[in-house]
Image (cartoon, rainbow, N blue to C red):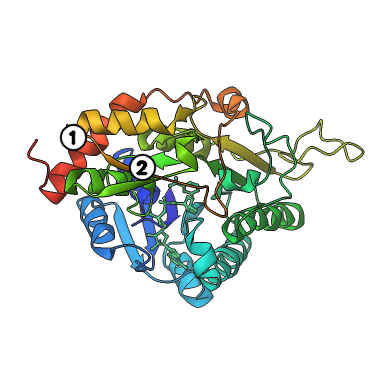
Amino acid sequence: MTILITGASGFIGMHLSKRLLEMEYNVVGYDNINNYYNPMLKKSRLDELNKYENFNFYKADLINYNTLESVFNKYGDINVVINLAAQAGVRYSIEKPQAYIDSNLKGFGNILEACRNYDVKHLIYASSSSVYGANTKMPFSTKDEVDHPVSLYAATKKSNELMAHSYSHLYGIPTTGLRFFTVYGPYGRPDMAYYSFTKDIIEGNTIKIFNNGEMMRDFTYIDDIVDGIVRLIDQPPQPDPDWDRENPTPESSYAPYKIYNIGNNQPVKLMDFIETLEKHIGKKAKKEYLPMQPGDVQATYADIDDLTEATGFKPTTTIDEGLKKFVDWYMDYYKVGGK
Ligand SMILES: NC(=O)c1ccc[n+]([C@@H]2O[C@H](COP(=O)([O-])OP(=O)(O)OC[C@H]3O[C@@H](n4cnc5c(N)ncnc54)[C@H](O)[C@@H]3O)[C@@H](O)[C@H]2O)c1
């Protein structure tokens, strides 16, 4: 079977592709290698993937439907599409909203059209925990309404879920949306706090801690996330026979449509997270405490019961183990820290 993975030179896309290549799937990667963060890191990730004979890669943009279609034409057997390509990041969506409209809305629209025209059997796509927006009821549940986004990024991710539903309804395409909760690990994203904290602690720069460190995050180690996605590939959603039009729940449907949280349901205090980082780096951070940033949320914590029930998914990596692996990778990749 051939699987198309968009965003394959991104953080999650690279790790997922690697696992699937090891499982002997044919993987077609698709990514525009944009410069939202240093493209050299994306190239290093691709170097890891190019070691496998069953990997093919296209440097192309999702907003170009013809290019996307040419990839489907070339490989007649793309049955599963995993769409991870997107403009990510909450803060950048305040600075550059157009990038989100282009990649996350137009780009996702093209993915749906390709799935429709090429009879794809399962579309799995990245949503985000940020769709919970102004909700404060914890843990965040896919059974709760998410109609109050606090960033354009979150609004585009929620839109993807709605767009997917319309295609599941109109064309019977099985679609699974995954709301990721702060994923971290080797080859991670430099725009995320754990990555820049590591850099700054090593270089002796002051780290900025928002909301006086009164934040909790459901940090999920990359291998656990990959495990969850792999478990879902052969489980396209079926219409839910219990779905009730009089009392509709948001996460399933009469159409083959499903939304899952995918996270670690053990939230960690930001200050504990920083202490663990300091331990593995072997150096104390210089800290500056600042107020909450616009668009940020105080806590994220996932209810993952649905995914556990459907697939047996259970994150196993502790923060201590996961951050050790990240710091070891970081020091080796950048040749810093003297460990
Ligand atoms: N990492 C997290 O903690 C997290 C949390 C919530 C949601 N997500 C979502 O998961 C997905 C993967 O995230 P990631 O952390 O790997 O991000 P990433 O930025 O490392 O990967 C995304 C990749 O998509 C590519 N891309 C962006 N726009 C494109 C376009 N128009 N056409 C082709 N390629 C394009 C980028 O070049 C990048 O390599 C994203 O959709 C993101 O929004 C991630």
Q: How many marks?
A: 2
**Residue at 54% in and 65% down:** 94
The disc, 2 or 1, on the residue closer to the chain's N-terminal end is 2
Instruction: Name the residue: 60% across, 40% down.
Output: 236
Q: Amino acid at mark 1?
A: Lys
Q: 36 and 251: which one is in front?
A: 36
Q: Indicate whether 314 appears above or below 72.
A: above
Which percent across, then down, holds residue 233? 50, 40
Q: Is residue 26 visible?
A: no
Picture quadrant of ligand 1: bottom left
Disc 2: CA contacts within 10 A as few (<14), some (14-19) or many (>=20) = some
The mark found on residue 283 in the picture is 1
Q: Residue reaching furthest right? A: 246
Q: Nearer the viewer, residue 117 or 293?
A: 293
Question: Looking at the image, which residue is at 15% across and 43% down?
Answer: 331
Residue 250 point in image, percent of width and height: 75, 41
Which residue bears the numbered disc 2?
20
Viewer-closest of 324 and 14: 324
